[in-house]
Amino acid sequence: MAAEDENDKQEAGDEAERRVLNQDEIDSLLGFDYDDDSGANKNSGIHAILDKALMAYEKLPMLEVVFDRLVRMMATSLRNFMSDNVEVSIESMTSLRFGDYLDSVPLPALLVVFRAVEWENYGMVTVDSSQIYSTVDLLLGGRRTKRPIRIEGRPYTTIEQDIVKNMVEVVLSDLSAAFDPICPATFKFDRLETNPRFVTITRNANAALLVRLRIEMEDRGGNLDILLPHATLEPIRELLLQMFTGENFGQDIVWNSHFGKEVRHTDIAVQAVMHETEMKLGEIMQFKVGTTVILNCKPEDEIVLKCGDVDLTQGSLGRVEDKVAIKLSRPVSESAKESLT
């Protein structure tokens, strides 16, 4: 019986080693769920691990305030630009990888690269074909029609590119004004590309914020995408973390004022340095009782008052009754005050 039990255990172990995962288990491990209409469940499996580095825009509350302000300003600016009623709305705000977005851009396309001057980085604006043809048709006096505009597969002409450039410059001007309440930002047109492969503003694996705006002009319109790599937003990340403009992240102003007053009553050690000299380590190792160290200074030379490594001021050495005193010859420098505070 003992031998039979041992054989059963051995067979069970061999069966466990030979066991192969079925397709459902593989899909669950990788994060795919083909029973769902979306085709894949990116909240589990390998997808969840790979997308963990993506910074969701919900963690930057001020971004919604900025783009809500942008929508209101664009509605007025584009109305003046096109001389027609224009409605602008936010269709989606998502975080994705830069390479995935470039792969999803349909061709032909017009991609405008702009430069964030203060942040020393770049962003991108993409205008889809429907919006381009609608804008060109409207500005060149086309007839109003409810029929959808035919999307042609030909490259865009110079006139169409110039019109898109002028429209994007209006959008960039409004985007700069939308960021002004948070921090100064200047977005300038850099170049216009027709091939996504030539738009290299960041690495394909880097995360980026994609804001898709819907522009409606009567019965026609299209989408305009604003893509900002997270590296571009990094210089103002702390400002974008605010829930409202001017938030101090829980700091107590009264406590800060009280702390500043109490610091001014703190005792610190001040040293009076007559002279400093540099010597070799070998010379110092030869010091003995009675060794004389000659300083390159005179009795009338000024003495430096220091607090740690900070030079405060200078003065001359003297005596008051039976105590050694120093008469200051200049006020405490402003740089020293800034270093101490």
Image (spheres, rainbow, N blue to C red):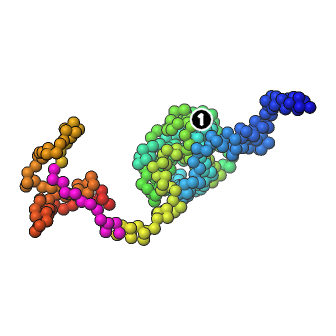
Q: Secondary structure at mark 1?
A: loop
Query: Which residue is at a point 46% across and 58% down the rendered structure image?
Result: 182
Query: Which residue is at a point 41% across and 48% down the rendered structure image?
Result: 118
Give the extent of the magenta segment.
262-275
Is residue 263 part of the magenta span, yes or no? yes
Direction from residue 21 to residue 317 in the image, left or right: left
- Find residue 54 and report its horizontal and vertical position in percent: 58, 45
Q: Quadrant of the C terminus?
A: bottom left
Direction from residue 173 to residue 310 in the image, left or right: left
Q: Residue 300, can we see it?
A: yes
Is residue 120 part of the magenta span, yes or no? no
Q: Nearer the viewer, residue 177 or 1?
A: 1
Q: Nearer the viewer, residue 26 or 292?
A: 292
The residue identified by callout 1 is 108
* Residue 320 vertical placement versus 158 (above, below): below
- Find residue 272 and report its horizontal and vertical position in percent: 19, 57
In the image as oriented, which residue stretches furthest toward the right?
A: 1
Query: Which residue is at a point 14% across and 44% down the rendered structure image?
Result: 291
Q: Nearer the viewer, residue 142 or 117?
A: 117
Q: Nearer the viewer, residue 83 or 106?
A: 106
Callout 1: few (<14), some (14-19), or many (20+) C-alpha neighbours within 10 Å?
A: some
Q: Identify which amino acid the numbered label 1 is placed on.
A: Pro
Q: Residue 132, can we see it?
A: no
Direction from residue 87 to residue 17 in the image, left or right: right
